[in-house]
Amino acid sequence: MNTEKSKQAFLDAQKVIPGGVDSPVRAFKSVGGTPLFIQKGEGAYLVDIDGNRYVDFVQSWGPLIFGHCDSDIEAAVIKAVKQGLSFGAPTQVETLLAREICDLFEAIDKIRFVSSGTEAVMSAIRLARGFTCKNDIVKFEGCYHGHSDSLLVQAGSGAITFGTPSSPGVPADLTKHTLLAKFNNLESVQKCFENSNDIACVIIEPIAGNMGLVPADETFLQGLRDLCDAHGALLIFDEVMSGFRASLKGSQGLVSVVPDMITFGKVIGGGMPVGAFGGRLEIMNQLSPDGPVYQAGTLSGNPVAMNAGLASLTKIKSQKELYRDFASKSARLTQGLQQAAKKHGISLHVDSRGSMFGFFFNENPVRDFDDARRSDTDMFARFHRAMLEEGYYFACSQFETGFISEAITLEMIEETIVAADRVFGAIK
Ligand SMILES: *Cc1c(COP(=O)(O)O)cnc(C)c1O
């Protein structure tokens, strides 16, 4: 495989962009080698600037549920572009998209649009704090909620549940309000509530996708619901990734636990920069200009992005078999990978939810971040490199989730498994 042009492009980029990338995971640090610079997408495929073609299991990290260059989304975007890129004034398409989402989710009476998942979560947390008049938040090790200050935390020392900054530039004064608990471990959350009577909210990815794919147990989520209710804290489901991915309603199509607020991103923008946060009326009414909690954005509800999102959602809802189809494709892919690995004496732990799939080079089930971290990341890196050579573009880290798009056919999945079989034989 010739990647000379990507190598040169990466050198050029590194001279003017830190690390050569605008989001760190893209630099391929955890798998080594040079990131591929992309020329274009074509349905299920990515094409790099050297002309290599790959089946794309990343899908821009989730948004492109219909694959690249979907004609309906493209048409909606082009139509919107011709009417103007941005007005900084309300447009009716915002109401249309908001109504679609409010109708779908029991937890959501009103929703506000922003421009990224990070912004959605940051705003939801501010609103939770404003609504409850409390300051602390609980988050889970291994869950990612964007890069805002109070969410860039890692476990502190020993028995302390208060997080410490995971990045320079984040004041410890901020992260002391972030308590860290363990995923799928209710006791660790109980401990947070014992340590603090100032907890505004518990935020979780109900189907975690940022430590690899690790779904939360329904009983665990119910436990969070009960703890939040008992202590007057809000429960926030961060479905920036799982929304419209795990099912039409994200986790809400799969479990019966209803949160107080939900955050979205990725798929609701159809590939354009969008985020959103929504919840019950009494909570959302606290938001400016109705209420005192401030939040704003020059490009929020951008008409091009709203039209892309609306076209995606309309198309999703028009296809009755979409998620059943996704589920059978991701189940086939993960089972196929697992069987092929086993043939070569390699243990894979696999899971999938709708169009999301995950596989860990791990002999044991993965139920939290500690389990995930025990995976064989060197083996993953070898797998990743060899699969690229075969023409398959997987996420460049063991701790990311894979995505099926509608453009990926069962035939492509069978071919992926055959290629993986070859690769496992070579890397074992
Ligand atoms: C991607 C992601 C975010 C951050 O969204 P950005 O658009 O990258 O800012 C937040 N939460 C979850 C669960 C995500 O997967």
Image (spheres, rainbow, N blue to C red):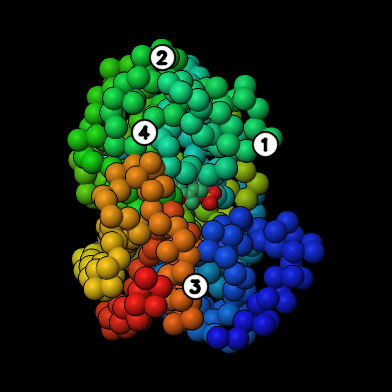
Point 27% across, 68% down: residue: 345
Query: What residue does disc 1 label?
Result: 168
Q: Position of residue 108 (x, y in %)?
A: 34, 39
Query: What residue does disc 2 label?
Result: 195
Mark 1 residue type = Pro
- The earlier-in-sequence mark between 2 and 3 is 2
Query: What residue does disc 3 label?
Result: 385
Separation of residues labelled 2 and 3 (CA atoms):
45 Å
* Vertical relation: 125 (above or below) 7: above
- The earlier-in-sequence mark between 4 and 3 is 4
- The earlier-in-sequence mark between 2 and 1 is 1
Q: Left or right of 289: which side holds 198?
A: left
Q: Left or right of 60: which side holds 371?
A: left
Mark 3 residue type = Arg
Separation of residues labelled 2 and 1 (CA atoms):
26 Å
Q: Which quadrant is the C terminus positioned in?
A: bottom left
* Disc 3, SS: helix
Separation of residues labelled 4 and 1 (CA atoms):
23 Å
Separation of residues labelled 2 and 4 (CA atoms):
15 Å
Q: Left or right of 256: which side holds 91?
A: right
Q: Residues within 10 Å of mark 2 (few under 14, many from 20)?
A: some
Residue 182, numbered circle: 4
- The earlier-in-sequence mark between 3 and 1 is 1
Mark 4 residue type = Lys
* Vertical relation: 157 (above or below) 247: above
